[in-house]
Amino acid sequence: MRGLLGIEPLERAEIEAILERARAFQTRESHKEILQGRMVVNLFFEASTRTRTSFEIAAKRLGADAVSITAAASSVSKGESLVDTLNTLNAMRPDAIIMRHAASGAPHFLARHLRETPIVNAGDGTHEHPTQALLDARTILDRGKKLEGLRAAIIGDIAHSRVARSNVHLLSKFGARVVLCGPAPLLPKELAQIAPGVELSYDIREAIREADVIMMLRVQLERQHEASFPAGEYFRFYGLRLEHLGLAKPDAIVMHPGPINRGREISSEVADSQSSVILSQVENGIAVRMAVLERILRS
Ligand code: NCD
């Protein structure tokens, strides 16, 4: 494994190894010897709170130096091209580059351009967000659930969601059944074909019925080019409320990659309920990213 560009190309065994290793990193014990003296550059061309911070903390807990660059504060805002920015950073000899970009495929382009530096995709456009799916899987397993035979409902703006895509690939490799649910303009029919075991539903109640996992997604207004639904209307049809939880399995969990928009895709009562594992997801982000960094850098 050179870097980590997506879940789709991974073997099930590689995913299992990362998830298992992440367990060892769930405590706050020091592991600074693992990547002592290595340097990880976070290159973020899009807004991020959780992902960037947790990659930074993960690198530091493993003893690496972590430098973060955000596009707005870099020379990108002075008109520098992507290739020139990358060449400049690469001249500083980082051991790995973590990249988030609004264009699908940008980290793959970077990986082809900088063959010797491992690249980790921290979210590329509407394509993939592999470490999010890994931390989601770790969180599901921590709740005593098995991925084999799991029933997951992923609800919201599926069309623009890299989180949905990475999760579909991961869950389907393990034989889970995934129902994708959202309003028709945000749920293109082709998505039923992206992996085995995927169904589509336009009805939130139908999607949630008997679910083990309910994964809510933000409406990605920044990626929509057409008029969006009024927030109130969206919430009425696709917002998750307490009354919905009774349709799912009794021990079902509610997930969300964040940032959450209370009163738009999820009610405050659900976000703060016992069923919600949103903050466990954030916590697992560090452990899973430590496992990924160790895997690509320790050699
Ligand atoms: C997501 C992202 O950026 O893809 N957030 C995250 O990384 N936790 C989802 C989103 O922005 O809605």
Image: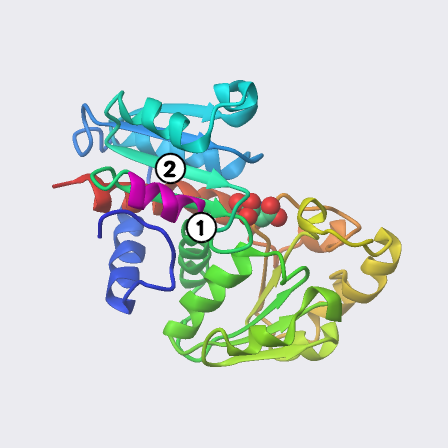
Mark 2 lies on a secondary structure that is strand
Asked if residue 205 is among those painted magenta in the image, a careful observer would answer no
What's the amino acid at mark 1?
Answer: Gly
Q: Could you give the CA–CA distance between mark 2 and mark 1, rounded to whole angstroms?
A: 14 Å
Q: Is residue 36 above or below residue 182?
A: above
Q: Position of residue 239 (x, y in %)?
A: 76, 60
In-front residue for pair 218/184: 184
User: Residue at image x 39%, y 35%?
Assistant: 55
Query: Can you identify the residue that label 2 sits on?
Result: 98
Q: Which mark is residue 105?
A: 1
Q: Is residue 283 above or below residue 249?
A: above
Question: Mark 1 or mark 2, which is nearer the start of the sequence?
Answer: 2
User: Residue at image x 24%, y 58%?
Assistant: 17
What residue span does the magenta drawing correspond to? 106-113
Q: Position of residue 31 (x, y in %)?
A: 22, 33
Q: Position of residue 249 (x, y in %)?
A: 60, 75
What's the amino acid at mark 2?
Answer: Ile
**In this picture, residue 2 sits left or right of residue 175:** left
Q: Quadrant of residue 106?
A: top left
User: Residue at image x 27%, y 67%?
Assistant: 11
Mark 1 lies on a secondary structure that is loop
Asked if residue 107 is among those painted magenta in the image, a careful observer would answer yes
Q: Position of residue 253 (x, y in %)?
A: 57, 63
Instruction: Please say whether residue 25 is visible from this viewpoint.
Output: no
User: As drawn, which residue projects farthest toward the left?
Assistant: 299
